[in-house]
Amino acid sequence: MEGNMNLTLQVWRQKNSRTEGRMETYQLSGISEDMSFLEMFDVLNEQLVHEGKDPVSFDHDCREGICGACSMYINGRPHGPLQGVTTCQLHMRSFKDGDTIVVEPWRAQAFPVIKDLVTDRAAFDRIISAGGYISVNTGNAQDANAIPVAKENADASFMAAACIGCGACVAACKNASAMLFTSAKISQLALLPQGEAERTARAKKMVAQMDEEGFGACTNTGACAAECPKGISMENIARMNREFFVAEIGTKD
């Protein structure tokens, strides 16, 4: 049928974090170019179940590119070949009939494989818990214009807050650094007056937690920003470094 493809899939299979993994090869036929990448995996899993085999485990939730769960390393790139697109928003029209597609999980010590393509990204949650919050009084919410915020700062904060925590930055970095993620979470609050109360402690605690989780150092190559599906800027890393240095200097005698 016109528009349908035959594909070879090479998929990482791993029972759990304690067992060795391996690549397995599957043949798929009749894949519509209008399918999303995850729908293609649904077809593969239906085929595997029909054959009495264990389906491939992969993570997803919204399938709308806003939750960050659909983390796959596709043909050597986080989320696949398109710029600014998450795996769930990737469609099979980006591939050709007869293509071989290699799919792996994120590769990072801090993101252990749970099963197959599913990794444990709870390290990101712990980084946020370490300092990614603000002090607020209970009661009714204030009016939107009660606290003036410069438009430049509001725009920069909003852009940093667009980070969905998918981990593509870590997967793209040869050192598995989490500095783009951590800096985005620090920046979105540091740029706003509401985040001033914890500003000093925030940078120190979140950077310390990032290091404790086992993420590597920044390479300054920019691979993280290049592969980020939300276009998070490396300017946030510079801002995080400034926040951290100011916090360190402020605590010295």
Image: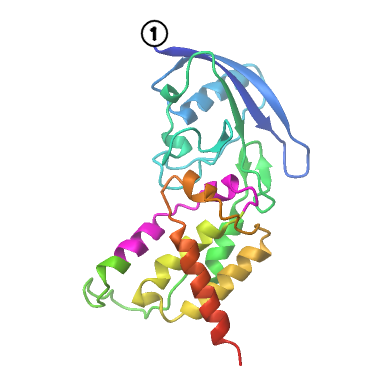
Q: Does the magenta stretch include residue 162?
A: yes
The number of callouts visible is 1
In this image, 91 relative to 205: left or right? left
* Residue drawn where x is 40% and y is 59% of the image: 160
Q: Quadrant of the C terminus?
A: bottom right
Place of residue 75 in the rendered image (x, y in percent of width and height, measured from the top left): 57, 30
Does residue 51 lie above or below 86 as drawn?
A: above
Q: In which quarter of the image is the N terminus?
A: top left
In this image, 134 relative to 147: left or right? right
Residue type at mark 1?
Answer: Glu
* Residue drawn where x is 65% and y is 52% of the image: 175
Q: Is residue 31 magenta?
A: no
Place of residue 27 in the rendered image (x, y in percent of width and height, measured from the top left): 60, 15
* Residue drawn where x is 62% and y is 45% of the image: 119
Place of residue 238 in the rendered image (x, y in percent of width and height, measured from the top left): 48, 65
Q: Which of 251 and 36 is in front in this view?
A: 251
Q: What element carries label 1?
A: loop
Place of residue 148 in the rendered image (x, y in percent of width and height, measured from the top left): 24, 76
Q: Which residue has dot 1 on it?
A: 2
Q: Nearer the viewer, residue 252 or 146?
A: 252
**Residue furthest bottom in the image:** 253
Q: Which of 26 and 163 is in front in this view?
A: 163
Does residue 68 lie above or below 75 as drawn?
A: below
In the image, the segment drawn in magenta is 154-176
In this image, 201 relative to 148: left or right? right
